[in-house]
Structures are given as C-alpha cells and as structure tokens.
Image (spheres, helix red, strand yellow):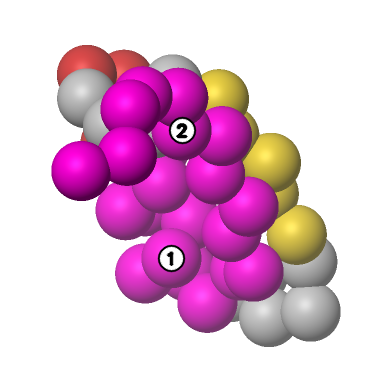
Amino acid sequence: MTDLTGKTAVITGSTSGIGLGLERGFAQARANVVMNITGTAT
C-alpha cells in the first residue's frame, strides 16, 4: 500500500473480518486510523 502519512481513515466494524484487515493495512501504511467499536464495557 502507498505511504498514507498525514491521511486519516475512518473504519467501522474494525474488530473483525474485513474491517480488521483494513485497519491493519491502513496502520501499516502510516495513516491515522479512527475505529468505530461497539460493545459493552468490561
């Protein structure tokens, strides 16, 4: 993936599946990553 330094990616459903893969890929490309995670506090 291209260097995405200074870019921001907003990803929903980033706890599993395609969303998780996208989150990891964008992070490796040095993008700022904003994740939407829903669930209960433990």
Q: In the rendered structure, does residue 1 fall within the stretch colored magenta?
A: no
Q: Specify whether residue 1 is in view.
A: no
Query: Which residue occupies 32% across, 53% down?
Result: 24
1 sits left or right of 21 in the view: right
How far from the left and from the top, in percent, is residue 20? 29, 35
The crowd level at tag 2 (other Cα within 10 Å; few <14, some 14-19, many 20+) is few
**Is 2 left, or right, of 24 in this rendering?**
right
Q: Is residue 31 above or below residue 8?
A: below
Q: Nearer the viewer, mark 1 or mark 2?
A: 2
Residue 40 lies within the magenta run: yes
Magenta segment: 22-42
Residue placed farthest to the front in the image? Answer: 42
What kind of residue is marked 1?
Ala
Q: Amino acid at mark 2?
A: Ile
> Secondary structure beneath disc 2?
loop
Image coordinates for residue 30, horizontal then vertical, percent: 52, 77
**Percent position of residue 16, x then y:** 22, 25
Task: Establish if 17 lies above or below 11.
Answer: above
* Dot label at residue 10: none
Tag 2 residue? 37
Between discs 1 and 2, the one toward the N terminus: 1
Quadrant position of the C terminus in the picture: top left
**Quarter that holds the N terminus:** bottom left
* Quarter assignment of residue 6: bottom right
Q: Quadrant of residue 39?
A: top left
Q: Name the residue located 63 percent from the left edge and 52 percent from the top edge.
A: 34
Query: What residue lies at 75% left-to-right and 59% top-to-bottom?
Result: 8
Whether residue 12 is situated above or below residue 33 in the rendered picture? above
**Residue under numbered circle 1:** 27
Q: Secondary structure at mark 1?
A: helix
